[in-house]
């Protein structure tokens, strides 16, 4: 599942901008977060080996998972360490890049990373399965109907697909099995009389390859987050068939979580990270042009494309300080239970501690 990091960082970022494979990008010590590539893949942590004892005065190393797209705070923390208050002093970061949030959850459950990105739905699944004891500490993007971009599923103009029932017998892609987008499409199509695996086929396609597979006819429909949606629509020949917000009008798309034991063992380091998380979140709002350059550099998406959507009305919602919308997240978790995708009702209040939220940082 997890692959050892190579040494060509630029190639690594380019490959993963296409969403092809999870790799590790290591940085430890006072070097900036994007330097070095000597870290081991998260799979090795399944052995549950104890990390060497930290010497007095040394910063705590935090192993953080991340992905593309939509994780702007993490991109800024990697590329703009000079704006951070505590990096290199209270903590350092070893970065691991993954194809979506679902494998980040797997790495958290395996003990391979200390923090990572989860989607609203997959976080409920992990909680319900007791796969990992985590604390929600921040948010990256949300989707609010009428107020932000909503992830959109596209079909070809000439596909003959006019409504959801036309997807019977077709192939519908998801970016990763077990992702929030798979849960969304599964539920919406079920509401329209179509059962996954019986009435339509589900395949896994990375976001970076979704458009090519759609145009070649390998899939009949698939989800397009920004900027992939913008790129596909500008080329023409495709049309929307449904949106995530058709199922959940308000949806917490991506959250950052920490392994609860790590927080218990290193509370001061986590609070220091959270202070820098808030700084990175505020930097986005105050420095949109610099943020766009960072996102273009990390994702290898052309800057002119980034300029057309990021931090505009066509973008996802970004909380000004990276605070998670916990009330909406509870509604998302309730939907997971009510739609039969988790077997028991889960309470968000059991998965955060106010002391470790961005709003607690003064």
Image (tube, rainbow, N blue to C red):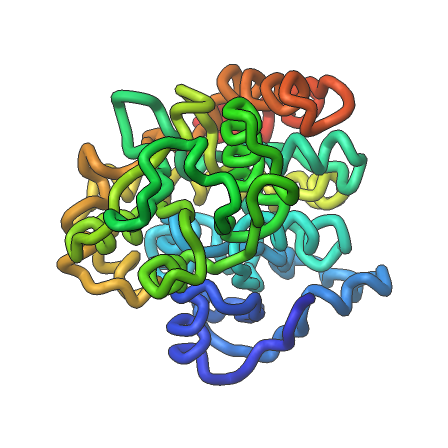
Q: Quadrant of residue 34?
A: bottom left
Q: Is residue 181 visible?
A: yes
Front-most of 36 and 12?
A: 12
Q: Quadrant of residue 166?
A: top left
Q: Quadrant of residue 4?
A: bottom right
- Picture coordinates of residue 259 (x, y %)? 70, 43
In the rendered view of the protein, which quadrant contains the N terminus? Answer: bottom right
- Picture coordinates of residue 103 (x, y %)? 62, 54
In the rendered view of the protein, which quadrant contains the C terminus? Answer: top left
Above or below: residue 129 compared with residue 250: below
Which residue occupies the extreme bottom position in the image? 7
Residue at (79%, 66%) from the top-left corner? 52
Residue at (69%, 52%) from the top-left corner? 106
Q: Is residue 349 visible?
A: no
Above or below: residue 25 compared with residue 340: below
- Picture coordinates of residue 248 (x, y %)? 45, 22
On screen, residue 164 versus residue 158, left or right, reads: right
- Picture coordinates of residue 40 (x, y %)? 67, 73
Above or below: residue 144 compared with residue 25: above
Residue at (39%, 62%) from the top-left corner? 213
Front-most of 302 and 247?
A: 247
Above or below: residue 117 compared with residue 348: below
């Amino acid at each position: 599942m997890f692959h050892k990091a190579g040494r060509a960082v630029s190639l690594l970022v380019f490959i993963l901008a296409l969403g092809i494979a999870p790799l590790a990008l290591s940085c430890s010590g006072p070097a900036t977060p994007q330097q070095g590539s000597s870290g081991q893949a998260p799979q090795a942590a399944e052995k549950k080996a104890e990390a060497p004892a930290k010497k007095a005065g040394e910063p705590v190393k935090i192993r953080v998972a991340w992905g593309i797209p939509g994780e702007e705070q993490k991109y800024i923390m990697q590329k703009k360490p000079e704006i951070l208050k505590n990096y290199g002093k209270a903590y350092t970061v070893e970065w691991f890049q993954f194809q979506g949030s679902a494998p980040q959850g797997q790495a958290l459950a395996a003990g391979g990373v200390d923090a990572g990105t989860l989607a609203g739905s997959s976080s409920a699944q992990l909680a319900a399965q007791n796969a990992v004891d985590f604390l929600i500490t921040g948010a990256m993007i949300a989707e609010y109907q009428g107020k932000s971009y909503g992830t959109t599923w596209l079909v070809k103009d000439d596909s003959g697909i006019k409504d959801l029932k036309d997807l019977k017998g077709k192939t519908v892609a998801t970016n990763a099995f077990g992702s929030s987008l798979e849960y969304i499409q599964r539920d919406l199509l079920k509401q329209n009389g179509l059962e996954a695996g019986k009435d339509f086929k589900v395949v896994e396609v990375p976001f970076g390859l979704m458009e090519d597979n759609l145009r070649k006819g390998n899939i009949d429909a698939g989800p397009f987050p920004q900027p992939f949606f913008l790129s596909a629509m500008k080329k023409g020949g495709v049309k929307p068939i449904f949106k995530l917000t058709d199922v959940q009008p308000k949806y917490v798309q991506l959250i950052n979580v920490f392994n609860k034991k790590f927080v218990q063992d290193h509370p001061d380091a986590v609070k220091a990270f959270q202070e820098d998380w808030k700084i990175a979140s505020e930097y986005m709002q105050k420095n949109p042009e610099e943020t766009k350059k960072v996102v273009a550099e990390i994702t290898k998406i052309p800057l002119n494309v980034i300029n057309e959507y990021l931090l505009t009305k066509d973008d996802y919602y970004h909380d000004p300080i990276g605070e998670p919308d916990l009330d909406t997240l509870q509604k998302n978790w309730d939907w997971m239970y009510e739609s039969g995708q988790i077997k028991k009702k889960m309470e968000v209040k059991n998965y955060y501690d106010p002391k470790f939220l961005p709003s607690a940082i003064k």
